[in-house]
Amino acid sequence: MSVPLYQAKAEMFRMLGHPVRIRVLELLQAGPRPVRDLLAEIDVEPSNLSQQLALLRRAAIVVSFRDGGLVMYALSTPAVADLLAAGRRILSEVLTDRDGLLAELKSTAE
Amino acid sequence: MSVPLYQAKAEMFRMLGHPVRIRVLELLQAGPRPVRDLLAEIDVEPSNLSQQLALLRRAAIVVSFRDGGLVMYALSTPAVADLLAAGRRILSEVLTDRDGLLAELKSTAE
DNA sequence: CGTCGACTTGAAGACTTCTGCAACTACTCA
DNA sequence: TGAGTAGTTGCAGAAGTCTTCAAGTCGACG
């Protein structure tokens, strides 16, 4: 496999590596949403949100279009939802393991 | 959803946002491997690889153990493979023969 | 024991990403 | 057309990440 290919993969995951961007993608799973709604749900400056949206747009993970006086954003592919779901699953397994270990730690007299 | 939760999600994706770390996880999909094998397959300084492995270990995405004179690494959960697969799928949808990476992506089953 | 091989850790400098402010563009609607 | 709303862009300082070098640990084996 070529070096650029896993650089592309890494770049894609890096795009999800930010709380605001994750939040945006989760909100967009339910369908297209105007920036104003995203702003209302995410505690962030408009300019900051716009910067994060620009990154997602440049990575082609979302697309934007205008609808009347509003700019709308949408996932460019529903596969993004699978990625988020897989992430959630790992997180829950990892946290469960950690809790399991924690319980074990507490119950053994060492 | 609490703020810390999507910070945790973001952190998990950020962990995958590096070519060396992606490469390591892809190699570990086939089963546990000693550091020396990873080093042989990835073009990186030993100390650098070790730093990246430490990050993955701290994020609980991989685990390490000793086997004789070698240190082995393994995925902490097979769900990591799903995440990589979902990433691949988005990349192929998003990349739609933009720079010839697409063909390679489809031809290598990893 | 002592030394060797196999990693790991610490630290520093280069580099990248994040954030918020201010200025700006793009539209809509009266 | 002019006023107003919605969003974007440029920029600079702060914060974080990456890479490399040197030094350190840990277990195996003679």
Image: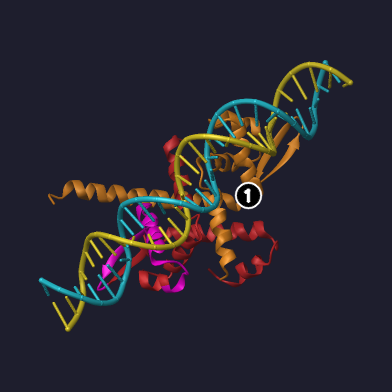
Chain colours: A orange, B red, C cyan, D yellow
- Left or right relative to A71: residue B77: left
Kindly indicate the quadrant of the structure image that contains residue D22.
Answer: bottom left
Kindly indicate the quadrant of the structure image that contains residue A71.
Answer: top right
Q: Chain of mark 1?
A: A
- Left or right relative to C20: residue B75: left
Q: Position of residue D18 (x, y in %)?
A: 48, 56
Q: Label 1: few (<14), some or many (≥20) within 10 Å?
A: many
The answer to whether residue B39 of the structure is visible from this angle is yes
Q: Residue at x 17, y 47 (%)?
A: A107
Q: Is residue A15 magenta?
A: no
Q: Position of residue A67 (x, y in %)?
A: 75, 35
Q: Is residue D30 above or below residue D16?
A: below
Q: Residue at x 56, y 61 (%)?
A: A7
The answer to whether residue B61 of the structure is visible from this angle is no
Front residue of D21/B38: it is D21
Local secondary structure at mark 1: loop
Q: Is residue B45 magenta?
A: yes
Q: Position of residue A73 (x, y in %)?
A: 67, 40
Q: Position of residue D7 (x, y in %)?
A: 68, 34
Q: Residue at x 35, y 65 (%)?
A: B73
Magenta-colored span = B40-69
Q: Residue flagged by tag 1: what amino acid is it? A: Ile
Return the residue at label 1. Answer: A61
Q: Is residue C11 above or below residue A65?
A: below
Front residue of C13/C22: it is C13
Q: Residue at x 61, y 72 (%)?
A: B107
